[in-house]
Image (cartoon, rainbow, N blue to C red):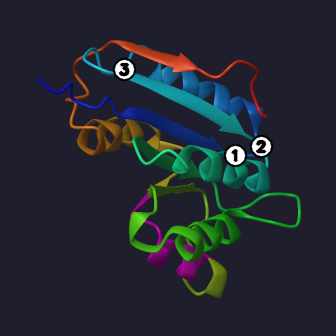
Amino acid sequence: MLKDKIITKHVILVDDKGSILETLEDLLSGFCIQQEIQIHSFSNPRKAFAKVQILKADSENSILVVTDLQFPQEDDGLDLIQIIIKQFNEQRPFIVLFTEKKDLSDKRVKKAWDLADEVITKPRGIFEIKKILGNYFDCPFEKVGKILPTYGRMQ
C-alpha cells in the first residue's frame, strides 16, 4: 500500500506595511482545521520571490502569493508577479493582488490587475482573502484550524 504524498501548503504575504502583514497573519491564524498552512511574510518582493523559488523546488508544495502593488523600494508587486510568471509559467503559484490602487488608466496598475489570478482592494477586501484561501486549498473558510506562521515577521 502506497502512502499518499503530503502536499505542504504555503501562503506568502508581501506588503511593505508591517501592520497589514500582522493583520493578515491574525486574520488567517486558525484557518482550515484539516490542513496545516504555513504563512511566510515579507516586506520586500525580491525576498518573497527567493522564498517562492525555494518552495517551488519541492514539487509537492502548494503556494498562494498575496502581494501589494506599491512598494517604496525599486521592485514592486508587478515586478514580483511578472518574474513569478516568467520563471514558473503554468506551474506558477496562484497570485492574489491586494492593493489600494484602482486607477486602471495607470499602465502598471492595469497590467498587475490583468496578470493576477484574483484582485482584492484594500481595506474592504481583507476578509475576502480568507474566502480565496478556502477555495484555493479546498477548505471551507468557516472551518478553523492551525496555520503555522514563519518565525520572524517581515523577512
Task: Magenta stretch: give its range.
Answer: 109-119
Task: Give the CA separation, mark 1 to mark 2.
Answer: 5 Å
Whether 77 is drawn above or below 8: the answer is below
Image quadrant in which the N terminus is located:
top left
Task: Give the CA separation, mark 1 to mark 3.
Answer: 20 Å
Disc 1 packing (10 Å; few <14; some 14–19; many ≥20): many
Mark 1 and mark 3 residues within 8 Å of each other at the beta carbon:
no
SS majority, magenta: helix
Residue 87 placement (x, y as % from top left): 58, 71
Residue 47 placement (x, y as % from top left): 77, 48
Q: Which residue is mark 3?
A: 31
Task: Give the CA separation, mark 2 to mark 3.
Answer: 22 Å
Q: Earlier in the sequence, mark 2 or mark 3?
A: 3
**Residue 125 horizontal side relative to residue 67, left or right:** left
Question: What's under tag 1, amino acid-wise?
Answer: Asp
Question: What's under tag 3, amino acid-wise?
Answer: Phe
